[in-house]
Amino acid sequence: MNMLTEQEIINNALKEMLFLEELTAEKYMAAAEQTMQPNLREILKGMEMAARNNYKNLNEKMSQMNIT
């Protein structure tokens, strides 16, 4: 059985984090579009933007580390 190197484990974890941030942003966006409550919509949009910002920052760090 092949063991993953520490770097491969880190790469896989970061890729999964990136995927989850994108998924989270999409879920918040969908929820914001569906709600009829303006206050809740603004909260959800803010949470979507936070997830997109996390995605952007994580993607930049991964690029710096040559993780594709």
Image (spheres, helix red, strand yellow):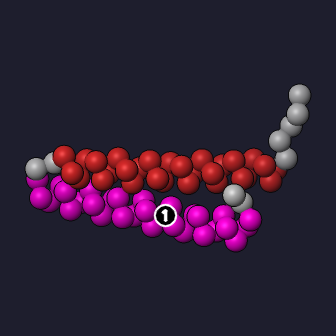
Q: Is 52 on the left or on the right of 38, as rendered?
A: right
| Residue numbers of the magenta segment | 37-66
Determine the residue located farthest toward the front in the rendered image.
Answer: 68
Q: Quadrant of residue 65?
A: bottom right
Q: x and y percent of residue 20 in the render?
A: 50, 48
Say if 16 sits above or below 45 in the image.
above
Say if 2 sits above or below 43 in the image.
above
Q: x and y percent of residue 43 in the render?
A: 24, 60
Q: Is residue 38 magenta?
A: yes
Determine the residue located farthest toward the right in the rendered image.
Answer: 1
Residue at point 60% right, 70% down?
Answer: 60
Viewport quadrant of the C terminus:
bottom right
Looking at the magenta stretch, what is its main secondary structure? helix
Instruction: Count every numbered label the image shows and give the total.
Output: 1
Residue type indicated by callout 1: Asn
Per the image, label 1 sits on a secondary structure element best described as helix
The residue at which mark 1 appears reads as 54
Q: x and y percent of residue 49 in the render?
A: 36, 64
Residue at point 11% right, 53% down?
Answer: 37
Q: Quadrant of residue 41?
A: bottom left
Q: x and y percent of residue 64 in the render?
A: 70, 71
Q: Residues within 10 Å of mark 1 (few under 14, many from 20)?
A: some
Residue at point 39% right, 64% down?
Answer: 50
Q: Is 1 on the left or on the right of 65, as rendered?
A: right
Residue at point 42% right, 59% down?
Answer: 51
